[in-house]
Image (spheres, grey):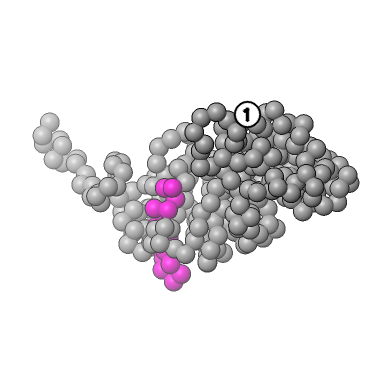
């Protein structure tokens, strides 16, 4: 038994605090190569933010028909109705807009919504009982929570500053990914719901190219994705993914290329 172990053992090097996974020799080689030339995303000049959490989708997420109805009743409604993507709408280098919209009832809008956006206020009023039952809504018995908000507002205290991030050029992605990476560029100021995320910052075109690269995607799934629900990755782990800076390249052998191709 000891001779067999000695002959077939594979040495695996780990950094302090790194997740413990068993890799074969080809996988070890690929991991070393990507880490030799790559810089973790956390050290790039970017931000990764979760999409909009409404707390009650039936009130805040609306169809195109309902959007048109609200705008017809009051044209100012258009100011706070935005197109939104769900995580499942995002594909590799593209997305499929499903003609759904979100009422962007930001933190503090309760002070003006009834007067400035009467049609939207009346729409939300129909759901008032359910909206008040959300855990973050103020006015409940007990000690007040720091993230409490008015019943007419979105959950998680969505600020105008956060909404402005969606107006920038950004990469949108889904935390639920299958065999191919679900990252795409958006320049149409779309929002995402809480199953979608956005990346803003510098070098986005280059980053998108890298995030959809088969070698990078294989490496993320195999080495950095972390455990959890099948096909769902922990977004915080994306910060650990090494991406080569412009001008650097991961040199893989033909055997390693075939290995990656067979597994993704």
Neighbours of disc 1 within 10 Å: few (<14), some (14-19), many (20+) = some
Taking the image as shown, residue 251 lies to the left or right of residue 154, namely left
User: Which of 251 and 144 lies nearest the eye of the viewer?
Assistant: 144
User: Which of 97 and 181 lies nearest the eye of the viewer?
Assistant: 97
Residue 6 at least partly seen? yes
Secondary structure under the numbered disc 1 in the rendered image: loop
Q: Position of residue 153 (x, y in %)?
A: 66, 42
* Magenta residue span: 236-253
Residue denoted by label 1 = 133
Q: Residue at x 10, y 34 (%)?
A: 2
Q: Residue furthest left?
A: 2
The quarter in which the N terminus is drawn is top left
User: Which of 224 and 4 lies nearest the eye of the viewer?
Assistant: 224
Residue 97 at least partly seen? no
Q: Residue at x 88, y 44 (%)?
A: 73
Q: Position of residue 192 (x, y in %)?
A: 63, 47
Q: Residue at x 55, y 60 (%)?
A: 200
Q: Residue at x 63, y 48 (%)?
A: 107
User: Which of 123 and 6 lies nearest the eye of the viewer?
Assistant: 123
- Main SS, magenta residues: loop
Q: Position of residue 247 (x, y in %)?
A: 44, 71
Taking the image as shown, residue 116 lies to the left or right of residue 236, namely right
Q: Residue furthest bottom?
A: 247
Q: Is residue 69 above or below residue 15?
A: above
Taking the image as shown, residue 175 lies to the left or right of residue 124, namely left
Q: Residue furthest right?
A: 72
Q: Is residue 64 above or below residue 198?
A: above
């Amino acid at each position: 038994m000891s001779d067999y172990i000695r002959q077939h053992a594979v040495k695996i090097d780990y950094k302090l605090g790194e997740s413990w996974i068993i890799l074969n020799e080809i996988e070890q080689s690929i991991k070393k190569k990507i880490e030799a030339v790559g810089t973790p995303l956390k050290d790039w000049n970017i931000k990764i933010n979760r999409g909009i959490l409404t707390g009650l989708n039936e009130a805040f997420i609306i169809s195109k028909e309902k959007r048109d109805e609200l705008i017809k009743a009051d044209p100012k409604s258009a100011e706070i109705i935005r197109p939104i993507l769900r995580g499942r709408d995002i594909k590799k280098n593209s997305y499929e807009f499903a003609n759904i919209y979100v009422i962007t009832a930001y933190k503090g809008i309760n002070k003006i919504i009834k007067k400035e956006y009467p049609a939207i206020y009346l729409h939300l009023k129909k759901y008032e009982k359910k909206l008040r039952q959300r855990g973050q809504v103020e006015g409940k018995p007990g000690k007040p929570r720091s993230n409490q908000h008015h019943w007419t507002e979105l959950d998680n205290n969505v600020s105008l500053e956060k909404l402005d991030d969606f107006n920038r050029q950004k990469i949108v992605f889904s935390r639920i990914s299958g065999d191919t990476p679900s990252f795409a560029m958006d320049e149409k100021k779309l929002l995402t719901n809480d199953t979608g995320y956005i990346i803003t910052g510098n070098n986005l075109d280059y980053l998108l190219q890298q995030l959809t690269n088969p070698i990078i995607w294989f490496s993320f799934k195999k080495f950095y994705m972390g455990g959890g629900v099948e096909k769902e990755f922990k977004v915080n782990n994306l910060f650990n993914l090494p991406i080569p800076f412009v001008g650097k390249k991961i040199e893989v052998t033909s055997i390693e290329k075939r290995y990656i191709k067979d597994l993704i």
